Amino acid sequence: PTASDSAAAAAAAVAPKGKGKGAPGPRYRLGEDPVMGTVKTWKGTFGWIELDEPLDNFKGLVYIGLGDCEDKEAMSEGVQVTFYTYKDGRGVGAECCAVGLAPAEGMKRSPEAPAGGAPAVVASGPVLVTKPAKAKPAGVPALLKPSGGAAPQATKVAVKPPTQGIKRKRITELEVMGEVTTWKGSFGWITPQEPIEHEQASKNEGRVKVMASDIVGDTKKLEEGQLVQFHVSADASGLCAEECLPF
């Protein structure tokens, strides 16, 4: 990682998850399936994600730190992301977060909870994050106090797979050509030979994001400088490639 990435990760590590005091403690993964959501609030080094579908035992906003983002420069309010979830002493957070329809598989996940169980989502104080109250400024999460003064017992949260909420729509009738300018193992960026005329084209400098799952054929990878033919779709994050055929 570069010096700027290290600084960003350090800043994200100390960004508050809620108004609870003390260190967040160890964090443990929640389930094995990726989930999807939209960045509701972004503060430069951390923010909050609104889930497309609530988790079984959690319906609030999910904390995201810059150090857990693959596409750091692309993070902004309104961007659709896919990620895995974890929990620690302060609440539920996102990790291996990537813009688009697949999580960042190249980033390391948190470990599974030990046999004794993961820490409760609500620790010593009101730290369970829910959607911001209407009377508060945007991005300020409301808090729920634990009933009876005792923290709830730790439970294993089942994560629903992202079978719904994929909000992208094809905008081309014929395939277009482009050149792969970046490839990062599970996704990359294509520069079209002709500019795409669409309201989302202004995002990501007009580049089109391509996921490995959208590549035609058995080889799910591309090389920088490679020519490809593809359809274009659009979602909240910008332009995406579909049925990408490499040459």
Image: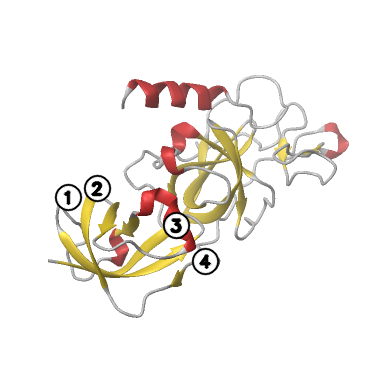
Q: How far apart are marks 4 and 1 (CA)?
A: 28 Å
In this image, 152 relative to 176: left or right? right
User: Which residue is the extreme one toward the bottom?
Assistant: 173
Q: Distance between the residues labelled 1 and 2?
A: 6 Å
Q: Is mark 2 on a helix, strand or loop?
A: strand
User: Which residue is the extreme one toward the left?
Assistant: 247
Q: Could one spot residue 69 in this view of the protein?
A: yes
Of labels 4 and 2, earlier in sequence is 4
Where is residue 195 shown, x and y percent of the image?
A: 32, 61
Q: Is mark 3 on a helix, strand or loop?
A: strand
Q: Label 1 sits on what residue type?
A: Glu
Of labels 3 and 2, earlier in sequence is 2
Instruction: Sort mark 1 into few (<14), some (14-19) or many (20+) by Cα contacts within 10 Å.
Output: some
Where is residue 119 shown, x and y percent of the image?
A: 61, 34
The residue under the point 66% across, 36% down is: 120
Instruction: Sort mark 3 into few (<14), some (14-19) or many (20+) by Cα contacts within 10 Å.
Output: many
Task: Report the residue marked by disc 1.
Answer: 224
Comparing 58 with 83, the one in front is 83
Q: Is mark 4 on a helix, strand or loop?
A: loop
Task: Report the residue marked by disc 2.
Answer: 182
The residue under the point 35% across, 80% down is: 173
